[in-house]
Image: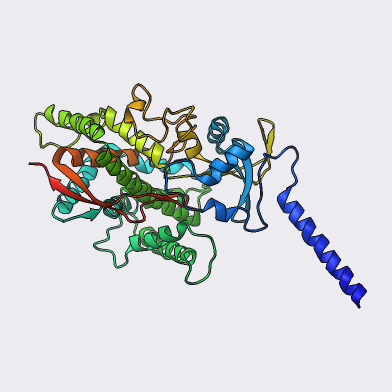
Amino acid sequence: MFSAGFYIGALLIIALTNLLYKWRYPRCNGVLPPGSMGWPLFGETFQFFSPNPTCDIPPFVKDRMQRFGPIFKTSLVGRPVIVSTDADLNYFIFQQEGQLFQSWYPDTFTEVFESLKKMLPEVEQTASRNLKLWSSLSSIDIKEATAEMIFGLTAKKLISYDAETSPENLRENFKAFIQGLISFPVDIPGTAYHKCLQGRKRAMTMMKNMLQERREKPRKVQGDFFDYVLEELRREDTILTEAIALDLMFVLLFASFETTSLALTLATKFLSDHPLVLKELTEEHEEIVKRRENPESGLTWNEYKSMKFTFQVINETVRLANIVPAIFRKAIREIKFKGYTIPAGWAVMVCPPAVHLDATRYKDPLDFNPWRWQGTDTHGASRNFMAFGGGMRFCVGTEFTKVQMAVFLHCLVTKYRLKAIEGGEILRTPGLQFPKGFHVQIYEKK
């Protein structure tokens, strides 16, 4: 009996050792990048989510860059991942979307943002109305206030959702999703991740019901995202399904209001901390108003495009914000690059902070310095700047985000002043957060 038990135990040890070996040293038709796969199932997920209270490159990435170089392998939430902090590989990934790497969204729906010129007055009116309201309060949390403002505008544009007339609160479901998004993925009732999934489920159900109502009562003139979806679904050659469309809708709504509100919060924090930047930004916008025949007339598209220093401020803000700390793609087939092999089916994680905070590309990379963008293209992506994506494609809604930021800053600096009250500290886990918010007082200029 002892002999049988001994052999069974030995076999189990051999099997587990073999499993561990296969996990740590995956098979590959070539040379995998160096790195560690961590433990089976968990990989290095806990290290990836460890908090970081600075704007610097996340410690998870920085430590491995020093140990393994700019391209390394790891495992996150049970998936093998190649992490790229290499500007050339990042550029290559974006250039090859849809060919070697799986795309995140279809091109057809960028059409929904083509009417930005028509939207400009609505964006300005929304910003002006909210700033007027906030100036009557003793203080506001700029992160929460701008998130609510932008969500209302974006949801109206994309799906004609109006919080004042809807029986359900769509944004509350998104808030539940966001609060658990950066948590460890354990789906047990009571955990942040479980609440995250439930929030997403409720939001998807709401949008599915709204899409069904639109299907039953179609509109004659296309006006929002759902109109484009229904037109696409009616085509015989479409690859779109209702499920894909709803997933895309969810992503667009989330990305548009959450990322923009984070960027605006950090921008107001930087302006509060850097009076010379605020002075030059204010002068640019006051000059725009002075050139008008009627100072009270609204912003024009040409005025928006003339905001050179504003776009420098926006670029510098999003460079330091790194709101999207990782951009994931999936290798469609095996790829060879710089002597390494990326196996088919593996995830590839582009790490923008490693590029945006590289001292060989940006002098004093942790300094907020909008003037570093003078004489450069502040509207495009490059090997060294990918805050909105990069390569052949640019992030869906990039211009929409820039419009909202630029217009909000215009309304703020021309008519209001702000005073920091409390908060403003950042935390990355690895996404950007303001755990205590950023509370400010906004008051009208006299």
Query: Is residue 102 visible to us here?
Result: no
- Is 416 on the left or on the right of 5, as rendered? left
Write the residue at 16% across / 43% down.
Answer: 417
The percent coordinates of residue 260 (x first, y second) are: 34, 46
Q: Quadrant of residue 205?
A: bottom left
The percent coordinates of residue 20 (x first, y second) are: 74, 56
Figure check: 332 above or below 213: above
Using the image as rendered, state which of residue 359 and residue 377 is in the foreground. Answer: 359
Write the residue at 58% across / 38% down.
Answer: 65
Quarter the N terminus occupies: bottom right
Q: Quadrant of residue 61?
A: top right
Write the residue at 47% across / 44% down.
Answer: 325
The percent coordinates of residue 378 (x first, y second) are: 36, 29
Using the image as rendered, state which of residue 226 and residue 372 is in the foreground. Answer: 372
Figure check: 32 above or below 14: above
Using the image as rendered, state which of residue 2 and residue 138 is in the foreground. Answer: 2
Quarter the C terminus occupies: top left
Task: State the residue lying farthest toward the top.
Answer: 375
- Is 378 on the left or on the right of 244, as rendered? left
